[in-house]
Image (cartoon, rainbow, N blue to C red):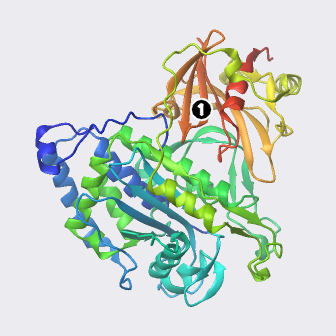
Amino acid sequence: MLATCELASLWSVVHDDGIAEEPQEPRRFRHWMLPLRMLLGGLLITVATGGAVATAGLLQLKGIQDELHRFGHTVDFQNGTVTPTEAGKPQTLLLVGSDRRYGAGKKDARSDTMMLVRIDPKQPAITVLSVPRDLAVQIPGHGMAKINESYGEGGLDLTARTLKDVLSTKTERFHINHAIATTFGGFIQAINHIHCVYIDVDRRYYHSNAGLPVSERYAEINIPAGYQQLCGTQALAYVRFRHLDNDLVRAARQQDFLRAAKDQLRQQGVFRNIKPLTRIFAKATETDSDLQSSRGILRLAKLAVAASGKPVRQIHFPGRLVAPGQGGLGTSYLGAYVTASPGAIHKAVEQFMHPSVPKPAPRSHKVSRHTAKAPMRDGRAQGLALVKAMPAHRATRIPIFVPNALTRRGQYPASTAVAPNPRRYVLRDAQGHRHAAYRLVIAENVTLGQYYGVQGTTWRTPPILAGSHQTRRIGGRTYSLYSNGGRIRLVSWQTRKGTYWISNTLTLDLSNSEMLALATSAKQVTAR
């Protein structure tokens, strides 16, 4: 955290607000807004948690302004679409991603990702709310449609006005302080610039267009399950994936990617990356005029500094998937879509604006085995059979842990030559050193895209375990618990020969007791 007297006097930052940091973190074919999330969530927030003095920070901000002014694009908004805010006040940012920039000679551009980010130094967390692209809404002047169509009809201005109508109530108007749209043109360059991103891939992502008609073609992809490094084109395919996926899982996958990219950028040091990344993003983005000015950038940066050290909390959008013709809206032409009641949306907005403070965990590291009890079923025999049937090469030898218990709906997908389960492989760290690794995939609900799994590697310090966490001592083993909004997303432990973890589904469908039950039941098995 920035801590010099000079910075405190220049930016009037209060670093200690009395709130303890919690162990939290912070969809169809074309899309993109991840570059922008990384720019604001990764750069400005990381600036706030870096170790630079004020003078250097202000010089960097001047460099950002110069790059944005030289390469950026400004959007003209109707009066009232975006609401400028005073210095030091909270800000809500709308981040929109599309395959193409609005007005560049096309009518079919649609926003494929919409994310709201709320930075308020008086709140216990920075909040993120992803809005499903297939949400059925009333678009002003255009009638009922999916919200992603608002971008093609009226660009960023109409998208922001539509979203404000959706999130407002009869008594309280929702305000957006900044709006930014981006294409995925600079994404590959940006990911390669930060030397790729390590991602915990929950299952195999595969699609080939060979032999398919044009109407059934999606972006091609072939990424196996397991913790691995994804570079430019692979990373883009991963976050763009929508075949056999739904809006809610897709948004969760993108937010998970954002968390990993942001953490990696922080570890590398933002100041040496900030200028080239800003140039990459500026060429692919368009913003309100205030974010093209030094005053607007400085206000946002000061706000990020004031909120430094706070977790990033993902707020669940209360969407419900509706099959074609079954929603009662008289909108069969929409196909499958997402809907949500005004009351449920209002509750999500309340959490977005005023996130609650999670109850602190007990300070004692000794936890009874009863804490981990949950309705589970025996799955050891099936897991053991999969492990023993899978040959291991010398480079992939590692002691393998298999959970004795599975969730009631958990099933092991069949192991095949193209998608082995477990998958044994070699994992390279950032320095190129080779480590043995394996991934055991478990399906919770294939239809809804819910997969959890067991990961093991001889790499002692993978970046995924570098974030804040809590520890628990259960049954003679020490576990590290990584959470988001009070929900455990990862449970890890170490042995003399390896590092292991249980990953929740992307949408965190497993309860805390189920996650602990899986981890505490994991036992080493003998494999050939």
The location of residue 61, given as percent across then percent down, is 22, 57
Left or right: where 305 falls relative to 175: left
Please name the residue that numbered disc 1 is placed on.
427
The number of numbered discs placed on residues in the rendered structure image is 1
Q: Nearer the viewer, residue 83 or 43?
A: 83
Q: Is residue 115 left or right of residue 71?
A: right
- Using the image, determine if residue 400 lies above or below residue 316: above
Q: Is residue 47 at least partly visible in the picture?
A: yes
The answer to whether residue 189 of the structure is visible from this angle is no
Specify the quadrant that holds the N terminus: top left
- Which residue corresponds to the image point at 66% horizontal and 67% vertical from the top-left? 341
Q: Position of residue 66 (x, y in %)?
A: 22, 66
Residue at 76% in and 24% down: 403
Of the pair 168 and 505, the residue shown nearer to us = 168
Of residues 456 and 376, the one nearer the viewer is 376
Residue at 47% across / 34% down in the picture? 430
Give coordinates of residue 440: x percent, y percent: 74, 32
Rate crowding at label 1 as few (under 14), some (14 to 19) or many (20 or more) other CA atoms within 10 Å: many
Q: Amino acid at mark 1?
A: Leu
Q: Position of residue 286 (x, y in %)?
A: 39, 73
Quarter in which the C terminus is drawn: top right
Up-down: is 27 above or below 359?
below
Residue 82 located left or right of residue 226 = left
